[in-house]
Amino acid sequence: MDEPHAPSPAGTGHILQSRQRLSRSLLWQLQRRYFAQAGLDAWRSGTVPHYVTSNPFIARAYAQLVLGWLRDVAPLLNRHAPLYIVELGAGPGRLAYHFLQQFFGLLAHSSFSDVPVCYVMTDYSQRTVAGWQSQPQFQPWIAAGRLDFALFDGERNDSLTLLHGGVTLAPGTLANPLVLLANYFFDGLTHDAFFIEDGQLFESLVTLTTPRPGADPTDPALLPDIACIYTQEPSSSDYYDDPAFNQILAGYQQELLLTHLLFPIGGLHCLRNLSRLSGGRLLLLAGDKGYHHAEELLLREEPGYDVHGSFSLTVNFHALGEYVRQLGGLFLSTPQRPVQLDVCAFVLDPAGQAYPETRLAYQQAIVQGGPDDFFVLKQGLEKHYAALELTQLLAYLRLSGWDHKIFLGCFPALLEKLDQADEPLRLALHEMVQQVWQGYLGLGEVSDVPFCLGLVLSGLGYHAEAAAFLQRSLLQHGPDAATFYNLALCYQALGQDAEAVAMVTQALARQPDLAPAGALHAQLVARRSPG
């Protein structure tokens, strides 16, 4: 552990910024600039991770939690006014897409089917929001009034205006409590750093250095090369302008004997703004890399950050929970320590209800086999897909919520075993293809989902439907020899030899040495030749 009054070992780089409070450091300007420039490309390229927080399984868990909470607040609901579900920092849009499907599917079978619900995707990046608005698969939801968008900065704003509906959500305007979803959100908000030793509190001032001489301090490409050097300065828990924040900090000073502490000041400002916006009536579901047990705060090292185009810090959910408790709210967390993803729930309610249905839903959807457990299981299973039977692969895909990423992982094993399918299993696999496609929100990645689905359908003998998926592949991913060849096989099986010849000719034009295509071309030409 470093000496509390001495700076960390000196870096060898060029100084970008010296001895600054972490929350005021240059890092956050670089963060904002990165997302302003990248937009959806940040996730499309795979640079910024999102799978663990944006899959059908976690969307289903959140849908179940929101419905549990609705059962608790049912007496308070104005069923003639919208219930808004606001996603903070909606990233690539996949959580929104999965949640819309999962939630409205469940809502239709519930006693809340008459409640008008509007899901609002938000971000502070105009480029990102514009990308969502142009997504073709969102258009039916927009037309139905169930999806809208807003520019919103959780640290700075306590109101937002819907870009399609034109309605402004502001303090005092909401007829119903507010639901908020925040996945991989709090880890990118501003933090401060402290050091605590034997009841003494020190602020950890950060010096940023880079090995690049003359580097542009506004260029986000600097982030992977920046080193953080901390200097500890004596401080007081009377540090912020909000006594509630200082009370949390003072508690840490008294209770933690020796540790470096990340303090989620941006997250606390965001919670304060959301409390104002909602009139103190809200449900917030947050999933992030983080910790929430008090003992996890002890003996922590100097904070570092993970770089993935942008950067992220580990979230101190314990501090956020303490703030919500100060406001008289409810903080729900798991008794176990998460491996990959910490999912917490926060409830604010001036009446101070017990929220038994919300607690029950959290137990069922998060504690007893939640998104973190599912992701850990996925990491183990994906090494053994080849050993699973068709029925087992199908069961796993159904359990996942027909996750397209899991389908892609299972695809080689599925394709190899298709000839083992009897008629009932063949029908079930056909349904699997429809479900995976319905839940797939394409971002323009390299992975060609329609091609793989088309091959499964072709292997099952659904050649016309397979051809339709392969045509989608051409539209989304461009001309490809393998796609043209498989289209030729489909048309051949359908007795459409002219179309088959056209497709196999395209395949050979792009890859003349594709031997199966050459053989098919010769076979088709011979069959069409007279005599």
Image (spheres, rainbow, N blue to C red):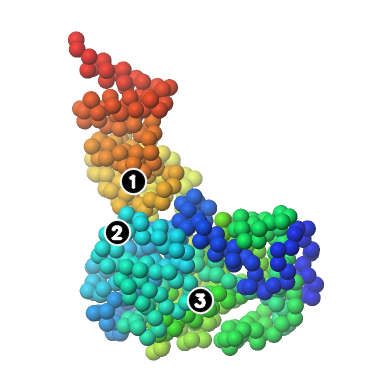
Q: Give the amino acid type for the residue marked by disc 3 in the picture.
A: Arg
The residue where tag 2 is placed is 139
Q: Quadrant of residue 298?
A: bottom right
Report x, y in % for residue 362.
41, 72
Q: Give the Cα separation between the discs numbered 3 and 2.
A: 30 Å
Residue placed at 45% from the left, 63% from the top? 126
Q: How many other residues sit within 10 Å of disc 3, few (<14), some (14-19) or many (≥20)?
A: few
Picture disc at residue 451: none
- Callout in the foreground (1, 3): 3
Residue placed at 44% from the left, 71% from the top? 152
Q: Give the Cα separation between the discs numbered 1 and 2.
A: 35 Å
Answer yes or no: is residue 285 visible: no
C-beta proximity under 8 Å, tags 1 and 3 = no
190 and 244: which one is in front? 190
Q: Secondary structure at mark 2?
A: helix
Q: Give the amino acid type for the residue marked by disc 2 in the picture.
A: Gln
- Callout in the foreground (1, 2): 2
Q: How many marks?
A: 3
Q: Secondary structure at mark 1?
A: helix
Q: Quadrant of residue 138?
A: bottom left
The residue where tag 1 is placed is 391
Q: Give the amino acid type for the residue marked by disc 1 in the picture.
A: Thr
The residue where tag 3 is placed is 156
